[in-house]
Amino acid sequence: MLKRFYLILVLLPLSGAFANKVPVQIIPAPVHIEFHDGQFVIDENTSLHYNRRNTQLADLANFMGTYINGISGFRPAYHRKAENSIIFEIIANPELGKEGYELLVSPQNIRIKANGREGIFYGMQSLFQILTPVRTNAALVVPAMHIIDYPRFGWRGMMLDVSRHFFPPETIKQFIDLLASYKFNVFHWHLTDDTGWRIEINQYPLLTDVGAWRADRLHQTWSEREPVKEGEPNTYGGYYTQEQVREIVAYAKMRNITIVPEIELPGHSVAALAAYPEFSCTQKPQNVHAGGPYPEGIQSAYCVGNEDVFAFLKNILLEVMDLFPSEFIHIGGDEVEKSQWRNCERCQARIKEEGLADEDELQSYMIRRFDEFLASHNRRLIGWDEILEGGLAPGATVMSWRGERGGIAAARMGHDVVMSPGYPCYFDHYQAGPEGEPLAIGGMNTLKNVYDYEPIPAELTEDQAKFVLGAQANIWTEYITTVSHLQYMFLPRMLALAEVVWSPAENRNWEDFNRRLDGWHFRKFDKKGLTYSRGNTKVSITPVSSEGSLEVFLETEVIGGEIYYTLDGTDPTLQSNKYSGPIIIERSLTLKASTVRDGRILGLLPAQQDFNIHLASGRDIQYENPVSRYYMADGPNSLTDGARGTLKVTQYWHGFNGRDMIATIDLGETKTISSLTLGALQKQVDWIFLPPQVEFEISADGNNWQKWGIAKNPLQEDDKSEQTVDYTVSALASQARFVKVTARNFGICPPGHPGEGHSTWLFVDEIVVE
Ligand code: TNX
């Protein structure tokens, strides 16, 4: 038994060596790690040795002394002799780059070598990961080894939104500590939004006096928040004073982290405009937004026609630049409600004067001016990918969040890019469940989805790929009100991303990552009292229909997990069927499946899916207009997979942007048809509108079509609630082999809708032939 144990360790080069019983389970996985015989023990006789004329090294030594003191009670200090010591050594080794390091542990000493302070810092972090996270009375034992390590990307980031919910400076520092220990080097701080302005600006005190406070809506979910009533007290909020900001910036700098501040413009600016309504288009007073959809009268974007707006924002940015040494300054730029500009005389006058084509170009005009302004102060502008619409400012760097499209386009134009696509980099989305999970914004980004992420899109050439600076994950906090909930959302997904952005792609190994997580990092979190997710135990159910047959594939992310399932509606037990390959579904039924590990069923509830079998089940579909690559559900034949979509838009829905859905199905043989149905979705907040009508046709040969009937949108015009709607036409039984369904796209988002003037989405989930 013992022998086998060692054998496994030898086979997995990245796995921890249990020689000396000290697990070495570093995340992110180092480039190269090798274990030697023996160990070094850090105790009260251990000293630190480095060149004392180098003040940066002295700072790092101090940092290390404090850390070791915190977990051991003794504090190693400088000694001129390099015996029994931890040695910092500045070398010149191009292989290591700016942030790389070499860590050599022998029974005599620990040596950290690097080209500069950054590398020494990361060598220290690798060492800390091996040590106990909290104080115990055990000796600090470090196995003898040799690590050579350096990052794959220069931008290894995490974004935190402190506007939707405010988190105090201590939480920010704790977050920075975690970032540092997993070798992230960028903290993108989303400081302003509709729901609160969180940074003190001396010249404009109302930004925080007014803009940092709002009506308390913590008890209501984001999408259902009531608009603020007149005279309602603003009791929820908070902000960081400039003194606190300076302290946090220094705290981060010590930990090799650059804080990139984000000051949103021109949109997401309700809080600022509540403080200074004169900078909005209507100039009417308003309240800080409490969250949820914008109520009528709310102004969320600055007036671009008003020159005073530029002076105001420049003054703010001057104070921001004074606080943050970061080369990059983030100016937001996302989700601007441009309809306000359409009805504003001054904005329209600006469009004319500047010879701009439309409101998209008006936004670009504003971004361009701030690009120039920041450049004149030796800073660089970065913004969300909407800054591409209407033309990209010459110096701008793009943060790609609506998929990778924006990033790809910008890299092709020779602009720097940071990848942060919603899937899988949004840590406000579910990571498991969703049953049994805290309410999240929707969508599913599991630990494995994050771990499997590749920041360089296959579409880019090698030269274009150089513009991808790296990647980051974003934690939007609409639904996150407490510190422990916040931790739960990024632990452990942040560790998966750390490995994506630091480790060489070929060193990534999902099983080994899990082993390190389970074997050490989770225990560290437990000891430190951090809240974290144990990952996704939910079985994923994927129907695949092809050539008339419907097969269902089951999968679990749990390493060593098995799947047990039932087809009779009961919850699976250890006596149920064990999954060994695709299940063929031939009748309507409910499938339930659970993950089992070590003889135990994991998770609160089994995964569950109803399958409704009908005459077209499993049949291939031909589309005249292709389905959007962003909404392809589980594959090409989602409309005949027997699985109906839910209000979770990514699952089982096919999406069409601005176009009609025209689908033809060959039933394989002539069948008797009495009813045809198409399922569609209404979710107007996501620009998804119901088709005004659906036309059904049948045919014996696929060439000559005969009208079957037309179904109109059955809802009242004022019914805008989120729902799925079936369009059905029943008629006298007829014989046919082919069925054609044409669903008309609604077309253009109507006036007053945030997407006014843009194409609408059509979402369909199933064509039911009975
Ligand atoms: C979109 S990402 C937003 C945020 C929301 C987020 C929720 C981006 C640039 N804008 O304002 O918080 O979705 O997932």
Image (cartoon, rainbow, N blue to C red):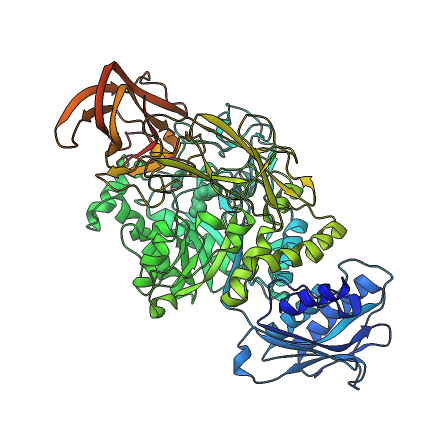
Please tell me which residue is depicted at 27% across the width and 41% down the height of the picture: 346
Residue 270, position in %: x, y? 45, 38
Q: Nearer the viewer, residue 199 or 136?
A: 136
Q: Is residue 137 above or below residue 583?
A: below
The image shows residue 159 at horizontal and vertical percentages of 53, 52
> Residue 509, located in which quarter of the rendered image?
bottom right
Total labels drawn: 0
With respect to residue 354, does 595 lie above or below?
above
Q: Quadrant of ligand 1?
A: top left
Q: Quadrant of the N terminus?
A: bottom right
The percent position of residue 107, horizontal first and vertical second, equals: 79, 80
* Residue 25 against residue 300 in the figure, above or below: below
Taking the view exactly as shown, the residue that stands out farthest to the top is 732
Is residue 673 visible from the viewing direction of this image?
yes
Q: Quadrant of residue 279?
A: top left
In this rendered view, identify the residue nearer to me: 687 or 677: 677
Residue 167 visible in the shown view: no
Compared across the picture, whether 45 is left or right of 182 comes to right
Viewer-closest of 506 and 149: 506
The picture places residue 672, in percent across and down from the top left corner, at: 26, 20
- In depth, the one of 449 and 719 nearer the eye is 449
Q: Quadrant of the C terminus?
A: top left
- Residue with the most extreme front position: 669
Outermost residue to the left: 704
Residue at 66% from the left image edge and 59% from the top image edge: 516
324 over 767 or under it: above or below: below
